[in-house]
Image: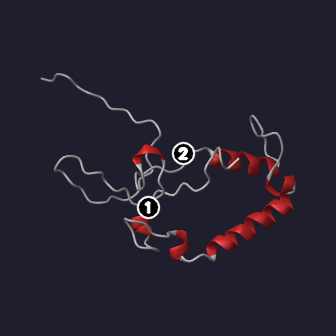
Amino acid sequence: MTASLPIDESPSAAHGPTGSHAGSSFQYGWWSYVDKDIRAVLGESVQGPLDRKYCGGGSLTACRDILISTLKEAAGRTAAQVYPGDDQCSAGDQWCADSIVQRTLGGIKHGRISWQNRPTYQQVVEFTSHR
């Protein structure tokens, strides 16, 4: 399954033709599957449910245990493990790892900007004439 939907979508990872630090994250849809599965395990009504309950094999106790253990494992990681560094950033530098690196176009160069949670639909409106 992970060959179809990548699971590490950090802002600094290279995704598609734009390369790393392009500002893209949360592109592949795992988030909605996890949300739907956990709601089903909790016994909530889920529209278009998955074919089965995955977290903890459907057991609320087992699901809770796996979520707690993986959260503890994640919390035990060092900043350098979470943000390993690349050609743009030092290991452990969260702000840099999450930043958007502007691509130089012509002679204009801009510095990094903070990662932004932009909408998936962006609209440009052009006003061709004005008074």
Q: Residue at x 62, y 74 (%)?
A: 75
**Alpha carbon separation for disc pair 1 and 2:** 15 Å
The x, y position of residue 4, in whole percent, is 65, 43
Q: Is 110 on the left-hand or right-hand side of 47?
A: left
Tag on residue 62?
Answer: none
Instruction: Answer with the quarter of the image where residue 74 lies.
Output: bottom right
Q: Residue at x 45, y 69 (%)?
A: 85
Residue 79 or 34: which is nearer the viewer? 79
Q: Is 37 on the left-hand or right-hand side of 92?
A: right
Q: Is residue 33 above or below residue 121?
A: below
Q: Residue at x 30, y 51 (%)?
A: 103
Tag on residue 98?
Answer: 1
The x, y position of residue 82, in whole percent, is 54, 69
User: Quick one: label 1, few (<14), some, or many (20+) residues within 10 Å?
Assistant: many
Q: Amino acid at mark 1?
A: Asp
Q: Is residue 48 above or below residue 22?
A: above
Q: Find numbered disc 2 in the image and state the secondary structure of the residue it sits on.
A: loop
Q: Find numbered disc 1 in the image and state the secondary structure of the residue it sits on.
A: helix
Q: Is 50 on the left-hand or right-hand side of 103?
A: right
Tell me which numbered mark, 1 or 2, is placed earlier along the sequence.
2
User: Quick one: label 2, few (<14), some, or many (20+) residues within 10 Å?
Assistant: few
Q: Is residue 19 above or below residue 68?
A: above
Q: Is 47 on the left-hand or right-hand side of 79?
A: right
Q: Amino acid at mark 2?
A: Gln
The x, y position of residue 73, in whole percent, is 68, 73
Instruction: Answer with the quarter of the image where residue 95 lies.
Output: bottom left
Quarter of the picture containing the C terminus is top left
Tag on residue 27?
Answer: 2
Q: Residue at x 84, y 58 (%)?
A: 60
Residue 30 or 65: which is nearer the viewer? 30
